[in-house]
Amino acid sequence: MSTYIVLQQMGVIVILVAIGILLYKRKIVDNTVSPKISAIVMDICNPALIMASILSGNIEASHSDLAEAMVLGFAFYAGLVILGIILPLVLRVKKDKRRFYNLMTVYTNVGFIGIPLAKTILPEKAIIYVIVCNVMYSLLFYTHGITVLSDGREKINIKKIFSPGTVMAILALAVCWFNVSLPPIIANSISYVGNATVFLSMMLLGVAIARSDMTKGFKEIRVWGYIIIRMIIVPVAIFFALSAAGFEPVTILGLCLMAMMPVGNLPLIQSEKMGEDTEILSGAITVTTIMSVFTIPLLMILFTNI
């Protein structure tokens, strides 16, 4: 992948995000409309994009490739769970706030931003690693995630693990594994729905940036420490570790891109439901999302030219 392609695709993303900011400023998409569009993206468009990527026929993945992706995905999140315990200590976060940084470390935006971004700038085969990361994310969040957030008070919700995105991701892996072909009318319908994901998700990202209070987030020094360690050092470490192990470039780029994602929205949503203080999470989401516009292309250019 050339530097020009990465810059071009990230430029497209910036324009789509800018459209979202403009739509919010002009009150075309407001705080009432955006949650409904978010639900459409997360429960319909994103799952459709996952399946459409598999059904495109452009992914040539053997059973060993899929097995490798699942093993690497497991190792990836096992490492993040451990890092989630260590990073708050490194950043000297107050004891009662460490759980938020723990969640920020493990649960980044691999779905809402990761899926459309991977579809835009990575080779088709890389979507396998994106799908696996999203499955791991869902399995972990409603078990490990809510346990960390509630300090063990909240019960694990097995039903929520199997969200539309998780179910579709598992089905997509099954379709890829068994090489299933769907009727054209079904496959084309899924493709059309999935194609809406990139614009809608980036537009909503712009809306989220436009309505946030960026001042508080940018003043929090620990968030900058998080960005340096979690969004820069960790992807670089993964890149060199996988390169030294002899993995294919598409594998390396797929997992590295997932490691570059900004803080995800799900911890914030769950915190709001539980009546927790959301100031740290909301500020971190805003700052890391804005900074990812710069860190992702810079790292991708670095990785593709080494």
Image (cartoon, rainbow, N blue to C red):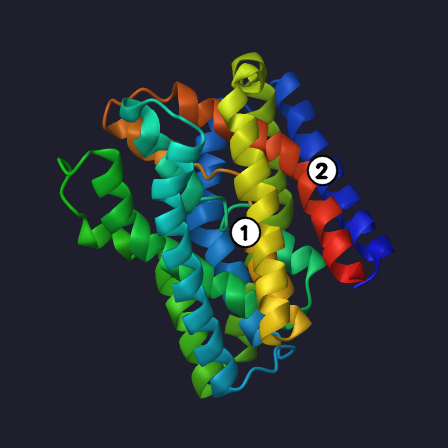
Find disc 1 in the rendering and name its residue: 259
Marks 1 and 2, how far apart at CA: 15 Å
Residue located 58% across and 74% down the image: 245
Q: Nearer the viewer, residue 191 or 300?
A: 300
Q: With 30 as the anchor, is 148 left or right in this view?
A: left
Residue 188 visible in the displayed image:
no
Relative height, residue 124 to residue 300 (above, below): below
Quarter the N terminus occupies: bottom right
Reply above or below: 45 against 25: below
**Which residue is drawn at the image coordinates 69% and 68% (left, top)?**
123
The answer to which quarter of the image holds residue 74 is bottom left
**Rendered location of residue 42, percent (x, y):** 45, 47
- Farthest-out residue, right: 4
- What quarter of the picture does the C terminus occupy? bottom right
Above or below, 24 against 15 in this view is above
Label 2: element kind: helix
Q: Position of residue 272 (x, y in %)?
A: 31, 26
Q: Amino acid at mark 2?
A: Phe
Image x and y of residue 198, in percent: 63, 49
Rendering coords of residue 152 (x, y %)? 15, 38
**Element type at mark 1:** helix
- Name the residue located 62 percent from the left edge and 60 percent from the top edge: 239
Give the labeled residue for mark 2.
Answer: 294
Badge 1: few (under 14), some or many (20 or more) residues near its Cα, within 10 Å?
A: many
